[in-house]
């Protein structure tokens, strides 16, 4: 790997079309005037401007890299729609219908208000998108919950704890049991957090849907477009609450493999321990109580 390959910012600051144009112009003038002064002036100017250009280019490349990483894990709206279950898609259609009916009711206001109402369409689209993201994340949490049987996991943890308390264990067996127990405890804690997040997302979805149903009831006898705009702003603020957290969850879940985790349980621990004790060449470790 060459020097420029190890420093991509330096390579990009030197090898680009603008530098090629300037170099060609300086060389051309130097040949035309039979004087190296234009080329020397270009080199001097490049050396003076290089620190500023280099830092600006470095920041730009960092931003481009972050955007590329985000695009690699973020899902498009169509991809999320295709991955929804039939029930979730029906719920999304119901919310979209609520938004359409609310806007239809407010179209009966005075012509002077129509310009203000037209600006609310993008807000309704944002509300639907936020609802879709939460639906998608809630379904992914539900899938992860079904991938692991909590009752089986609890039994496995209890078996590991009992196996660890045996009087004589080879050091390798003891370390393997400790590591397995630690991982399964972490899995149990993660399942609890996932369940709490799924319940919170469900409550947010219900709250947003109820708020739009309330707006629909108000829109039947609505007369004030300004009040309507404020109510839509409130609904949008609720839909976008904790947007950074939702976006981070979406990126994390979108980067996970599509296949569900295996539900296979660990083998019988006493059989595994006995087999490893037979094969272990190390001195058995005596557990002190």
Image (cartoon, rainbow, N blue to C red):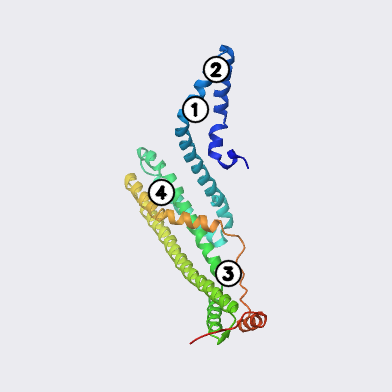
Circle nearer the viewer, 2 or 4: 2
Circle nearer the viewer, 4 or 3: 3
Mark 2 highlights which residue? 36
Asked if marks 4 and 1 touch (Cβ < 8 Å), the reply is no
Q: Is residue 68 above or below residue 214?
A: above
Q: Can the viewer see residue 28 in this picture?
A: yes
Mark 1 highlights which residue? 46
Query: Along the polypeptide, which appears first: circle 1 or circle 2?
Result: 2
Pick the residue in front: 4 or 122.
Answer: 4
Q: Alpha-carbon distance for marks 4 and 1?
A: 63 Å
Asked if marks 4 and 3 touch (Cβ < 8 Å), the reply is no
**Where does the image place residue 144, in percent across and percent down from the top left?**
55, 66
Q: Alpha-carbon distance for marks 1 and 2?
A: 16 Å
Q: Is residue 265 above or below residue 58?
A: below
Disc 2 is placed on an element classified as loop
Q: Alpha-carbon distance for marks 4 and 3?
A: 45 Å
Q: Alpha-carbon distance for marks 2 and 4?
A: 76 Å
Disc 1 is placed on an element classified as helix
**Where does the image place residue 200, in percent across and percent down from the top left?**
43, 64
Mark 4 highlights which residue? 105
Q: Alpha-carbon distance for marks 1 and 3?
A: 60 Å
């Amino acid at each position: 790997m060459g020097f420029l390959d190890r420093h991509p910012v330096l390579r990009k600051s030197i090898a680009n079309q603008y530098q090629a144009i300037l170099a060609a112009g300086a060389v051309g003038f130097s040949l035309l005037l039979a004087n190296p002064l234009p080329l020397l002036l270009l080199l001097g100017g490049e050396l003076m401007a290089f620190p500023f250009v280099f830092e600006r280019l470095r920041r730009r490349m960092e931003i481009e890299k972050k955007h590329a990483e985000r695009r690699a894990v973020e899902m498009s709206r169509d991809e999320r729609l295709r991955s929804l279950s039939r029930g979730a898609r029906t719920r999304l259609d119901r919310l979209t219908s609520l938004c359409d009916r609310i806007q239809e009711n407010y179209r009966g206001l005075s012509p002077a208000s129509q310009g203000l109402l037209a600006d609310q369409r993008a807000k309704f689209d944002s509300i639907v998108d936020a609802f879709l993201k939460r639906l998608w994340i809630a379904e992914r949490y539900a899938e992860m919950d079904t991938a692991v049987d909590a009752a089986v996991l609890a039994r496995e943890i209890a078996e590991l704890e009992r196996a660890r308390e045996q009087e004589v264990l080879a050091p390798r067996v003891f370390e393997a049991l400790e590591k397995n127990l630690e991982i399964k405890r972490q899995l149990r804690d993660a399942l609890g957090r996932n369940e709490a997040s799924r319940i919170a997302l469900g409550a947010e979805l219900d709250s947003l849907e109820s708020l739009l149903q309330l707006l629909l009831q108000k829109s039947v006898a609505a007369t004030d477009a300004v009040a309507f705009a404020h109510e839509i702003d409130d609904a949008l603020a609720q839909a976008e609450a904790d947007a950074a957290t939702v976006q981070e969850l979406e990126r994390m879940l979108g980067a996970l493999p599509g296949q569900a985790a295996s539900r296979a349980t660990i083998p019988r621990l006493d059989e595994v321990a006995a087999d490893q004790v037979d094969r272990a060449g190390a001195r058995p470790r005596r557990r002190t109580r």
